[in-house]
Image (tube, rainbow, N blue to C red):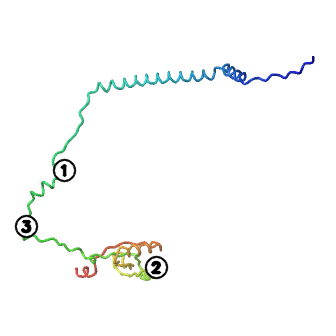
């Protein structure tokens, strides 16, 4: 009788699962042991840290208990904060008719004039040249001659200005042209001539 060739047997799934389980059970214990060692080390460190904190907190509380607590310095003010509530009702006014009333009029705008001096020259030709340079900038300048201990001087002036903005504009234009200016305040001519 002839035998039929036999096929190798296939492993069943139950055998494979058993083989997988047996290999997992025989896995090296280092992985789970490492987890256990880390857990134990963390617990020990936590306990030591809490004991050390308790030890330090007990030491810091002891000197605080030994010191007597001083009462806080609180100052409570009673009554009004301002004196004028008490002072003003007690004031007496002297309504003597011989006292002159104060001048309540606002000072006039013409009480002072503001000028810009743009140069001071020994020769009138130099002063006239400066006046021409200012005319090219659109500014109207005047020349005044004056005597001093050093001789005769010719001064170039801009103004008087009607407003602060006009004066600022003139100063800006002269500064851009590299001309130095000097701001002067004068009384009006009528008041100067009367004196």
Cβ atoms under marks 2 and 1 closer than 8 Å: no
User: Is residue 175 toward the left or the right of residue 19 in the image?
Assistant: left
**Helix, strand or loop for disc 3:** loop
Q: In the drawing, what numbered circle is on residue 81?
A: 1
**Helix, strand or loop for disc 2:** loop
The residue to which callout 3 is attached is: 95
The residue to which callout 2 is attached is: 137
Q: CA distance from mark 3 to mark 1?
A: 30 Å
Work out which quarter of the rendered image holds the N terminus and state it.
top right
Point 29% across, 24% down: residue? 66
Point 15% across, 48% down: residue? 79
Residues 38 and 146: in front is 38
Q: Position of residue 35 (x, y in %)?
A: 58, 24
Residue count near mark 1 (Cα–Cα under 10 Å), binned few <14, some 14–19, many ≥20 = few
Q: In the drawing, what numbered circle is on residue 106?
A: none
Q: CA distance from mark 3 to mark 2?
A: 60 Å
């Amino acid at each position: 009788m002839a035998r039929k060739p036999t096929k190798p047997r296939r492993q069943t799934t139950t055998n494979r699962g058993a083989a997988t389980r047996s290999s997992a059970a025989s896995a090296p214990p280092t992985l789970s042991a490492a987890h256990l060692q880390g857990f134990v080390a963390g617990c020990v460190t936590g306990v030591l840290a809490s004991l050390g904190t308790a030890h330090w907190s007990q030491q810091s509380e002891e000197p605080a208990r030994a010191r007597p607590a001083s009462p806080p310095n609180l100052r409570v003010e009673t009554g009004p904060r301002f004196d004028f509530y008490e002072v003003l009702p007690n004031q007496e006014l002297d309504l003597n008719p011989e006292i002159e009333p104060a001048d309540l009029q606002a000072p006039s705008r013409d009480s002072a004039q503001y000028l810009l001096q743009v140069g001071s020259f020994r020769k009138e030709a130099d002063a006239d040249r400066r006046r021409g340079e200012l005319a090219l900038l659109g500014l109207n300048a005047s020349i005044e001659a004056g005597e001093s201990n050093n001789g005769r001087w010719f001064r170039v002036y801009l103004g008087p200005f009607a407003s602060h903005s006009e004066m600022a504009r003139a100063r800006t234009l002269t500064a851009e042209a590299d001309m130095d200016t000097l701001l002067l305040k004068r009384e009006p001519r009528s008041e100067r001539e009367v004196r």
